[in-house]
Amino acid sequence: MSGHSKFANIKHKKEKNDAAKGKIFTIIGKEIAVAVKEGGPNPDNNSKLRDVIAKAKANNVPNDTIERGIKKAAGSTEAVNYVPITYEGYGPNGTAIIVDTLTDNKNRTASNVRNAFTKGGGNVGTTGCVSFMFDQKGQIIIDKEECSLDADDLMMTALDAGAEDFSEEEDSYEIITAPEDFSSVREALETANIAMASAEVTMIPQNWVELSSEEDIKKMNRILDLLDEDDDVQAVYHNWDE
């Protein structure tokens, strides 16, 4: 697992400018809309919405912004119908990239995603071409500085709640769950007042690819930056060992 690198990426993203914060708000706003449409506006009866709210709080989204998003999704008869589409492809040196999107315009999204790959010297492949290289898992990252429990107590709390794996990094803890156990483990940690830097169901690479060429690194960053700037893109997973 790559808990340390994941935590470093979390800290880096949280230190970015207001434009990056706006992107996070857009992503979570769409996820709230989809969760409310699927399971209703009451988080007590909607585990997916509870998970999105937890993700929002981990990303410092204000409570009133969350509540407005829920009310808007619940009350609007003309709410935008977002369709999930996943793209898979290759970056420099055979790196594997998965792109999750939520869109109201499939043609626009497909064009933008292909453009991002092309400008970075990569290409979009067929469904399934790289996803077999990843495992879908629930992943919870905890900042050591924000956690009052010692490693053993935290590990037992997580494992008792149904976690598959627990690892300790230099400045963080990583908890891995099966996707179907993610909500119950996250809620057990929340009940124990354990702050989470990140909590989401994600795609974890089975193996990592190193890029030694400066040109390859530049191209890979180009792909990732263009995807990050696209409001239709919800998440990007890759196996580049940064």
Image (cartoon, rainbow, N blue to C red):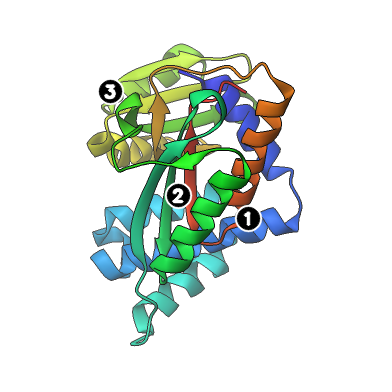
Q: Say which of 94 and 186 sits in front.
A: 94
Name the N-terminal-most of marks 1 and 3.
Answer: 3
The answer to whether the residue labelled 1 contacts the one labelled 3, judged by CB atoms less than 8 Å apart, is no
Where does residue 96 sit, x and y in percent of width and height? 45, 30
Q: CA distance from mark 1 to mark 3?
A: 39 Å
Name the N-terminal-most of marks 3 and 2.
Answer: 2
Q: Say which of 48 and 96 sits in front.
A: 96
Foreground disc of the pair 3, 2: 2
**Residue denoted by label 2:** 54
The answer to whether the residue labelled 1 contacts the one labelled 2, judged by CB atoms less than 8 Å apart, is no
Q: CA distance from mark 1 to mark 2?
A: 23 Å
Where does residue 38 sit, x and y in percent of width and height? 25, 65
**Residue denoted by label 3:** 160
**Residue flagged by tag 1: what amino acid is it?**
Glu
Quadrant in which residue 121 is drawn:
top right
Foreground disc of the pair 1, 3: 1
Q: CA distance from mark 3 to mark 2?
A: 20 Å
